[in-house]
Amino acid sequence: MHHDAFATLVALKSTLDDHLPLAPGLLRNLRKDMVLRYTYHSNAIEGNALTLTETKVVLEDGLTIGGKLLRHHLEAVNHADAITHLENLAKENVLLDESVLKDLHQLVLRGLDNEAGRYRGCNVIISGAGHTPPDHLHVGERMQCFFDWYRGDAQSLHPVERAARVHTDLVIIHPFRDGNGRTSRLAMNLELMRAGFPTAIVPVDDRLAYFQNLDKAGKDADYGPFVQQLGQLVEQSFEPYWYLLGLA
């Protein structure tokens, strides 16, 4: 993704900044819509069977859906809680570190996995992927390198590029046994939100291209395709704002 694309995103962001602060009612409306869509899509990518409407009923009315797994209900509630936590982190401008990452993972898999919030103690294969995550014995040291990069060189990157690389590297290292996708998308959005961008949602319908782009980075260390995909998703993430502000 070249400078023009980043320039477009910067221009969109300054347009939005001109309309801040948003009216509280507008903000609540946008947030409710985002939490629902983000939770639905992020979980659906991982095989959660709840539809968008069912997710809405679970989150807003606290009801369970007949014939759907309890696990899928918990995944929805957990993810919505993780977003709330994310918003607080972004508001306080918290940088990602090991405890922030493990807290996000803990929230995503709360009550679902007794290894929630802990790095994996076993080896994993990502089915269909062209790369294999590192041996579990190397996870700690790979994560150490990741956080060194994040605190160092990463801070001079454009926030969208940094967010894309954070996500990609976490998926490649695959530090947890389960929940890596959801957790790394949350970490990605922490970068975007800290920089004042709206939350980017990877739609479940785009998951084929998404997995291919992440795999390209894992196989060939080529981050370009995913950086570009994220740039497009960030651009789309402004649309609900324009619509509600009457700028569409």
Image (tube, helix red, strand yellow):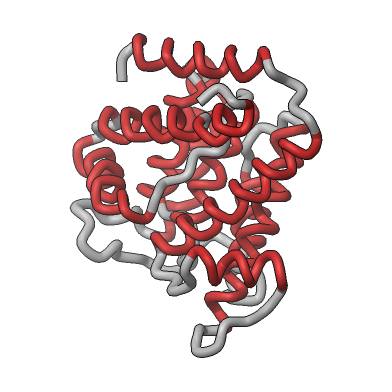
Q: Which residue is more in the foreground, 183 or 63?
A: 63
Number of numbered discs on residues = 0
- How far across and how far down the image is residue 196, in percent? 63, 25
Q: Which residue is more in the foreground, 164 or 7?
A: 7
User: Residue 25 appears in which quarter of the rendering?
Assistant: top right
Above or below, 72 against 88 in this view is below
Q: Residue at x 33, y 34 (%)?
A: 229
Q: Residue at x 65, y 41 (%)?
A: 30
Above or below, 198 against 102 in this view is above
Above or below, 64 against 120 in this view is below
Q: Residue at x 25, y 52 (%)?
A: 208
Residue furthest bottom as drawn: 67
- How far across and how far down the image is residue 72, in percent? 53, 75
Q: Can residue 117 be spotted in the picture?
A: no
On screen, residue 40 versus residue 227, left or right, reads right
Residue furthest front as drawn: 246
- How far across and how far down the image is residue 155, in percent? 54, 20
Q: Can residue 84 be spotted in the picture?
A: yes
User: Residue 95 appears in which quarter of the rendering?
Assistant: top right
Q: Which residue is more in the foreground, 92 or 203?
A: 203
Q: Residue at x 70, y 34 (%)?
A: 90
Q: Which residue is more in the foreground, 187 or 39?
A: 39
On screen, residue 194 versus residue 46, left or right, reads right
- How far across and how far down the image is residue 78, in percent? 64, 65
Quadrant for the N terminus in the image: top left
User: Residue 66 appears in which quarter of the rendering?
Assistant: bottom right
